[in-house]
Image (cartoon, rainbow, N blue to C red):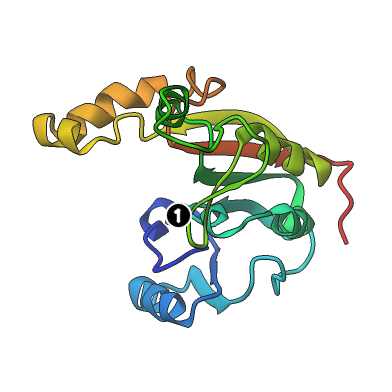
Amino acid sequence: GAGCGRLVDECRAFDTVTLVDASPAMIEAARDRVGSDTRFSVIAADAAHLPIPAGSVDVVVAVRLLVHLSDPSEVFREIARVLRPGGRLIVEFPNRRHLLAVVRYLTGRQSWSPVARQTHEYLAGHFAHQPATIEAQLRAVGLEPDVRRTVSLFRSALLKRLIPARVLAAIESPLQRPLGRMAPGPSIYVGSIRSDAATIG
């Protein structure tokens, strides 16, 4: 889910980075973004069928990918295949049980339960996931979650008009990890490590 390559600046410390996306338009934009930097390669592929050798990757970052998947189990299995033992997956996804969804449900302003285990299609082709379900799916393929961060705690147009974004970010940053287990934010990051016992195939 590399998209247009908007995270490449965060990856420049790595010797080799492979950007993968299924969209031809995003692939073209990512190639334009990385230009002639030889550390980056850009390939078109489905996340469930990566043309990457087993056990060859140190880190996989998947931001804004799970929002497009009703069931990411097959993608997690493929990520476990390409990661080396001890390799890390960092995945971000929309949180089904975020605080505002809970408040809306309890006050009758929302019909769907935020605590149900299945995904919720909140827009056509856009899915919010239950953190516990995602973590269970990761464990099922040998990816052991070891950190959770809740983000976008101040996702409010009114707050953003009243308070500069850098101030909101400075307030939120130290809260992301300690509030991770409670998951009040609309987005969640989960970090996991591929166990030595995971099957590569």
Q: Who's the residue at 63% across and 46% down the image?
A: 89
**What amino acid is found at the position of numbered circle 1 in the picture?**
Cys
Q: Residue 132: where, in percent of width, then height?
A: 67, 32
Question: Which quadrant is the C terminus positioned in?
Answer: bottom right
Q: Which quadrant of the figure has residue 75?
A: bottom right
Q: Who's the residue at 61% across and 37% down the image?
A: 130
From the viewer's perspective, tell me whether residue 158 is left or right of residue 88.
Answer: left
Q: Which quadrant of the figure has residue 171?
A: top left
Q: Nearer the viewer, residue 174 or 160?
A: 160
Q: Residue 151: where, in percent of width, then height?
A: 41, 33
Q: Who's the residue at 10% across and 30% down the image?
A: 162
From the viewer's perspective, tell me whether residue 36 is left or right of residue 161.
Answer: right
Q: Residue 139: where, in percent of width, then height?
A: 78, 38
Q: Nearer the viewer, residue 150 or 122?
A: 122
Picture layout, residue 107 above or below residue 124: above
Give the residue pinned by disc 1. Answer: 11
Picture layout, residue 96 above or below residue 42: above
Q: Which quadrant of the figure has residue 78?
A: bottom right
Question: Which SS class for mark 1?
Answer: helix
Q: Residues within 10 Å of mark 1 (few under 14, many from 20)?
A: few
The residue most toward the left is 162
Q: Residue 29: where, in percent of width, then height?
A: 37, 76
Picture layout, residue 193 above or below residue 13: above
